[in-house]
Amino acid sequence: MHPDNLISLKDDMVAFISGHGMRRMNGYVSDEVPTVLFEEENSDGWKDFVELAKATGAPFVTMSEAVLEKADIATLIEEIRDQMYPDDESPEIDDAEKLLRHIGKIGYLQLGFAYQGVMFLFEIATDWYDKFQNLMETVADLGTIVVDDRDNNE
C-alpha cells in the first residue's frame, strides 16, 4: 500500500540519488520516447532502479512529480459538468470533489535514466492520483464522442 502523499518518498529518493554520487535533473519523460518501465519487486524497488542507473554509468537521473492543485480539481469538475449536462448529480462529480482533500500533495513520482537510446523509467502513484487520472481520461473520452443526429434521408 502506498502512502497518501509521496513527499517523504521523494525526499528519500533525492538523498539516495545524491548519496550514490549522481545528479538529478527535473524532467518528465513522455510516452513519445522509447521507454522500458521498471517493475518493482518490493516497496524499495526504486533503490534497485537507482543502483541500476549507476551501474550503467548514467551521470544523472530525471525526476518528475505531480502535485495536485486546486485549479486541477476545479477544471476537472467544470469539464465533468460540461460533459454530463444536465446531470449535475453524476458520480464523477462526487469522485472529483473527494479529491479536494489531496490538494498540495504529491501523487506521482517518476525517475528515469537513458541507456543506449532508451529511457528506463520507475513510476509510482497514490491511489487517489490514479483515480484523478482515470477521471481525466473519462472526461477526455467523453469529449471525443460525436453524436450525429442528422436525418439519414439525405
Image (cartoon, rainbow, N blue to C red):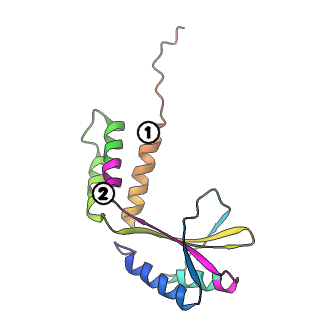
Specify the quadrant of the image occupied by residue 129: bottom left
**Amino acid at pointer 2:** Lys
Question: Which residue occupies 38% across, 57% down?
Answer: 132
Q: Position of residue 32 (x, y in %)?
A: 63, 56
Alpha-carbon span between mark 2 and mark 1? 23 Å
Residue 13: in magenta span: no
Identify the residue under disc 2: 70
In the image: residue 54, left or right of residue 87: right
Residue 59: in magenta span: yes
Q: Is label 2 or label 1 in front? A: 2
Q: How many marks?
A: 2
Question: Which residue occupies 43% across, 56% down?
Answer: 133
Disc with the residue nearer the chain's start (2 vs 1)? 2
Q: Secondary structure at mark 2?
A: helix
Q: Which mark is residue 127?
A: none
Q: Above or below — where is 87 with respect to 47?
A: above
Q: Above or below — where is 14 with respect to 63?
A: below
Specify the quadrant of the image occupied by residue 128: bottom left
Q: Which mark is residue 142?
A: 1
Q: Of 66 and 49, which appears nearest the observer?
A: 66
The quadrant of the rendering that contains the C terminus is top right
**Amino acid at pointer 1:** Leu
Q: Residues within 10 Å of mark 2 (few under 14, many from 20)?
A: some
Q: Of 40 and 9, which appears nearest the observer?
A: 9
Q: Residues within 10 Å of mark 1 (few under 14, many from 20)?
A: some
Residue numbers of the magenta segment: 54-76
| Contact, mark 2 vs mark 1 (Cβ under 8 Å) | no
Q: Above or below — where is 49 with respect to 144?
A: below
Q: Secondary structure at mark 1?
A: helix
The quadrant of the rendering that contains the N terminus is bottom left
